[in-house]
């Protein structure tokens, strides 16, 4: 009897944690300030458990997401680009709040460039404006 009660409590506790996790699945749009002006980024996220996969679409094309993880309302992932034969990693951290994600991204090793912050919006909503 006690064992069944313990399993029931554990089941509900784990279910509650899953219910607190943000839903990152689907497309998210953002306007991000770049060297050549503002660019539109489209994130297409797929979450399975705590694993995040998907693509980032930029004016240069699509890039797969790597090292993607979900932890409650926070996601982290990398985008690896190739510049003149040299791989460059951009690391993203985002925190969801409703239909927005507040992102910080870091190019290369920490300290190479300052982190950049921007907001993405869910679905077909107009992309968020890039900070000036």
Image: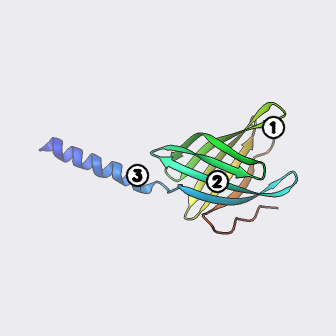
Q: How crowded is mark 1: few (under 14 residues within 10 Å), some or many (20 or more)?
A: few
Q: Residue furthest right?
A: 36
Q: Which of marks 3 and 1 is nearer the N terminus?
A: 3
State the CA–CA distance, disc 3 to disc 1: 37 Å
Q: Earlier in the sequence, mark 2 or mark 1?
A: 2
The residue drawn where x is 63% and y is 47% is 55
Find residue 16 and name its label. Answer: none
The x, y position of residue 39, in whole percent, is 79, 57
Q: In this view, does 41 lie to the left or right of 20?
A: right
Q: Which quadrant of the rendered structure holds the N terminus?
A: top left
Name the spot of residue 92 as percent of width and height, x first. Answer: 66, 46
Residue 129 coordinates in the image, percent (x, y): 75, 65
Foreground: disc 3 or disc 2: 2
Camera-near label (3 vs 1) is: 3
Secondary structure under badge 2? strand
Looking at the image, which residue is at 68% across and 69% down? 126
Distance between the Cα atoms at labels 2 and 1? 24 Å
Mark 2 crowd level (few <14, some 14–19, many ≥20, 10 Å Cα)? many
**Contact? badges 3 and 1 (CB < 8 Å):** no
Secondary element at image label 3: helix
Label 3 sits on residue: 18
Q: Is residue 11 left or right of residue 50?
A: left
Pick the residue in front: 24 or 20: 24
Residue beneath the point at 81% across and 37% down:
112
Q: Is mark 1 on a helix, strand or loop?
A: loop
Q: Do the residues labelled 3 and 2 touch (CB within 8 Å)?
A: no
Tell me which corner region of the image, top left, top right, bottom left or bottom right, holds residue 102. bottom right
Q: Name the residue under label 1.
A: 112
The residue to which callout 2 is attached is: 43
Q: In which quarter of the image is the C terminus?
A: bottom right
Q: Which residue is more in the foreground, 14 or 67? A: 67
């Amino acid at each position: 009897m006690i064992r069944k009660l313990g399993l029931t409590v554990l089941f509900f506790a784990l279910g509650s944690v899953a219910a607190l996790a943000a839903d990152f699945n689907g497309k998210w749009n953002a306007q991000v300030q770049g060297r050549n002006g503002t660019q539109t980024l489209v994130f297409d996220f797929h979450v399975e458990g705590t694993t995040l996969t998907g693509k980032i679409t930029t004016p240069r094309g699509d890039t797969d997401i790597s090292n993607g993880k979900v932890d409650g309302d926070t996601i982290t992932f990398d985008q690896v680009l190739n510049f003149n034969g040299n791989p460059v990693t951009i690391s993203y951290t985002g925190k969801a709040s409703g239909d927005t994600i507040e992102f910080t991204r870091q190019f290369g090793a920490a300290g190479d460039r300052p982190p950049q912050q921007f907001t993405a919006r869910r679905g077909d909503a107009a992309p968020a404006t890039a900070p000036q």
